[in-house]
Image (spheres, coloured by chain):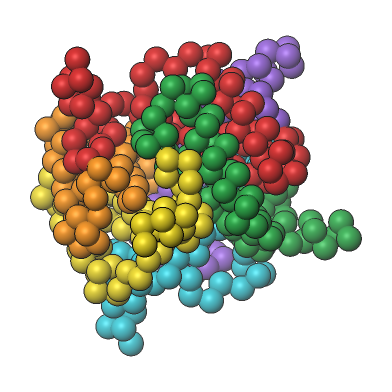
Chain colours: A cyan, B green, C red, D yellow, E purple, F orange
Amino acid sequence: MPYIKIEVTREGITREQKNELIKGATDLMVRVLHKDPAATFVVIEEVDTDNWGWGGESITDIRARQR
Amino acid sequence: MPYIKIEVTREGITREQKNELIKGATDLMVRVLHKDPAATFVVIEEVDTDNWGWGGESITDIRARQR
Amino acid sequence: MPYIKIEVTREGITREQKNELIKGATDLMVRVLHKDPAATFVVIEEVDTDNWGWGGESITDIRARQR
Amino acid sequence: MPYIKIEVTREGITREQKNELIKGATDLMVRVLHKDPAATFVVIEEVDTDNWGWGGESITDIRARQR
Amino acid sequence: MPYIKIEVTREGITREQKNELIKGATDLMVRVLHKDPAATFVVIEEVDTDNWGWGGESITDIRARQR
Amino acid sequence: MPYIKIEVTREGITREQKNELIKGATDLMVRVLHKDPAATFVVIEEVDTDNWGWGGESITDIRARQR
């Protein structure tokens, strides 16, 4: 019965990448914990860069400085 | 002081249904745990079907196959 | 595919009450959203009263004052 | 390694306020727990007022009555 | 900056398995999203079987019936 | 109606520090968002160092190497 929540910044993740995340996280539960895939939920939460802070500043500001 | 988070796929939940979920979850806390409704939060998180995985594939793909 | 997280203070919830919470939250998803119970997870998280704050103080302190 | 999630209703929070929340929550971890800011994540989740319940009704309904 | 929360029932997960979950989830973020491992948190939450419901009953009850 | 979840490793946080976290997070909501303290929940989740991964390894392993 695993539930996996993946929180990442919303920066252009494609549907193919989401499918890979879902498949990879589910496979991890099967391989390591021998869980049933049919009892495994994966939820991806995309967070605006304004709403994610790291080191005391937003990812928006960090990205602006990296350019 | 309960906090209840309800995560469901975003598939056309109406405002009336949301109100029923809020009322029902709050009543459950009152009935079973004798909690004060004024100290009960309910948060509904609607998740895109691309972002919810079950059995290793997205709900988008599952729904497409069900049609 | 609902996932419901119920967070409450750890203050002597019995196994019977937990079963009622699980049954009640699952029934709510079936009744309001027509979800399949077999695709509904309910997770109860019990939180120490030292670790739950309300109005700027811990539930431990609030309970001590209520006595 | 703290992770802080701030959930609030989506009611016009500005980018300046978000920056203050990120800075304030990070500073709190440094001041109280001596954590490294570079190892501190802050995530702000804005929730529609239809999706937040308090006292058994949505914030949308509470706000409508307050007017 | 990914944050991954893995919620599973507390049923004897070893430290080696936890290390595999941490490594596997981090590698997934690197491989699919090209994230920096140094900016990836993985948190494993073990939940008592009394506190996890599936299909309207607790995992404790489901396990008892499976024996 | 803010809800703030603070997740940190379980490494000897005192009750005094918890009280400071609760007070500090609540004050932040009041100062920045003008929220009512009586409508603000703060929940502190302490996570075993075996269960928190950073950079692909557990905090337990990172701490052992730092000694």
Q: Is residue B9 above or below residue E9?
A: below
The residue at the point 56 percent across, 66 percent down is: E32
- Indicate the quadrant containing the N terminus of chain B: top left, top right, bottom left or bottom right: top left
Seen from this angle, which residue lies furthest bottom?
Answer: A67
Image point (65%, 36%), residue name: C28
User: Is C35 placed left or right of F32 in the picture?
Assistant: right
Q: Is residue C23 left or right of residue D19?
A: right
D21 over D32 or under it: above or below: below
Q: Name the one closer to the observer, C12 or A16.
A: C12
Q: Which residue, as the protein is rendered here, is positioned at the far right?
A: B67
Percent position of residue A39, x then y: 69, 38
Expressed as whole percent of the image width and height from the top left, the position of residue B29 reads 48, 29
- Taking the spot 66% from the left edge, 40% from the top edge, the residue there is C29
Dividing the image into 4 quarters, which one contains the C terminus of chain B?
bottom right
Residue E19 location (% of width, % of height): 46, 40
Between residues F21 and B20, which one lies in front from this camera angle?
B20
Toward the viewer: D44 or E64? D44
Residue F33 in percent (x, y) is at: 24, 61
The one nearer the camera, F39 or D26, is: F39
Question: Is residue E49 in sight in this rendering?
Answer: no
Q: Is residue C29 visible?
A: yes
Q: What residue is rendered at 31% in x and 58% in y?
A: D42
How many numbered markers are drawn? 0
Q: Give residue F29's quadrant in the image.
A: bottom left
On the image, which quarter does residue C49 sit in?
Answer: top left
